[in-house]
Amino acid sequence: MVTPVNSVKVAVVQAAPVFMDKEGTLRKALDLVETCGKQDARIIVFPEAFIPAYPRGLSFGAVVGSRSPEGRKDFRRYFENSVDVPSETTVALGQAAKKHGAYLVMGVVEREGGTLYCTILYFGPDGSLLGKHRKLKPTASERIIWGEGDGSTLTVLDTPYGKMGGLICWENYMPLARAAIYGKGATLYLAPTADSREEWQSTIRHIALEGRCFVISVNQYVNKSIYPADLACYGDLKDLPEEMCSGGSAILGPLGQYLAGPVRGREEILVADLDLGLIGESRFDFDVIGHYARPDVLSLSVNEGPMTSVSYCQGYSPGKENPTGQEDQGQ
């Protein structure tokens, strides 16, 4: 049974990774968690694909119909620095969460088999890995490097501060995906992103107003100088600006008001104290899954089953005429 509380301090980490360097980025992340912990933050949120990087601007040598050997070398580097779940990396992150008694939400590129996924990991204040969410639909060229998640990781967690969950970047433009998160009662809505456009601010303000929830949106701040010059496709960056991603991280209240940020042009930790009673105030006139819903007219069915490409039936082996594994009983 989760005992509710009236307020919580949230920290949002706008920073750059050590590009495509898992161990270097992990060390930086742990230092940043330490800084947040010293400010008594109880929820600490990192950007999309923080470990080992969001590879903005890189083509990986892919065009329609072909992939270059040089691009494969960059993908190998990305693949080898991505995060197995669980692994020593996730253990270290869990220990950091436990040290400070905080919920830690970390954006990683997850590796499973031969596929990478854009994933957010949830660690509890006891250090345990509570769950994860894999991005359902990578955007545009992201589909070259990341696989798709499924409904089994539409995670919303019970915490003393309310139900916490969310979606990654442009998943938040998927109305049905948002409805799936609202339907689980999220009051702390996380929106880690790689979108630094001004238009993104309209998106997160809309989500706050639509869901009547706190919205915690966090982006990286990235300059071209963090990219290793020995990338095989480093030339892809030639015509791009020095500031690759300006940030725009922010924390919003359930009526769309800014509680911290947006901040641009630098690395920064944003901190805000959330008055959790504002959820009740905000839902006086609008509750998207309650008194303002019309399930007799509009409803959503969500498939939360894990999707696998191969399934095995118990008792079946190749060459058997009877795939059920049961003996024929005759007529």
Image (cartoon, helix red, strand yellow):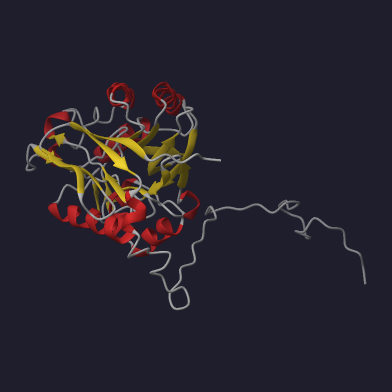
From what the image shows, is residue 50 above or below residue 214?
Answer: above
In which quadrant of the rendered view does residue 38 lie? top left
In the picture, measured across the screen, residue 329 lies left or right of residue 170, that is: right
Can residue 45 be seen from the camera position used here? Answer: no
Going 16% across and 35% down the picture, which residue do you hit?
Answer: 222
Farthest residue, direction bottom: 297
From what the image shows, is residue 129 above or below residue 214?
Answer: above
Most foreground residue, 110 or 205: 205
Most foreground residue, 33 or 22: 33
From what the image shows, is residue 86 above or below residue 145?
Answer: above
Assign the N terminus to one quadrant of the image: top right
Q: Position of residue 274 (x, y in %)?
A: 30, 41
From what the image shows, is residue 247 above or below residue 18?
Answer: below
In the picture, measured across the screen, residue 8 lies left or right of residue 268, that is: right
Q: Position of residue 79 (x, y in %)?
A: 36, 35
In which quadrant of the rendered view does residue 223 lie? top left
Most foreground residue, 163 or 145: 163
Q: Position of residue 29 (x, y in %)?
A: 30, 26
Going 46% across and 54% down the picture, which residue do you hit?
Answer: 150
In which quadrant of the rendered view does residue 250 lie? top left
Most foreground residue, 20 or 102: 102
Going 24% across and 40% down the picture, which residue do you hit?
Answer: 55
In the picture, measured across the screen, residue 258 lies left or right of residue 274, that is: left
Can residue 10 be seen from the camera position used here? Answer: yes
Going 55% across and 55% down the picture, which residue do you hit?
Answer: 305
Could you tell me how many numbered marks the image carries?
Answer: 0
Q: Position of residue 136 (x, y in %)?
A: 39, 54
Assign the C terminus to one quadrant of the image: bottom right
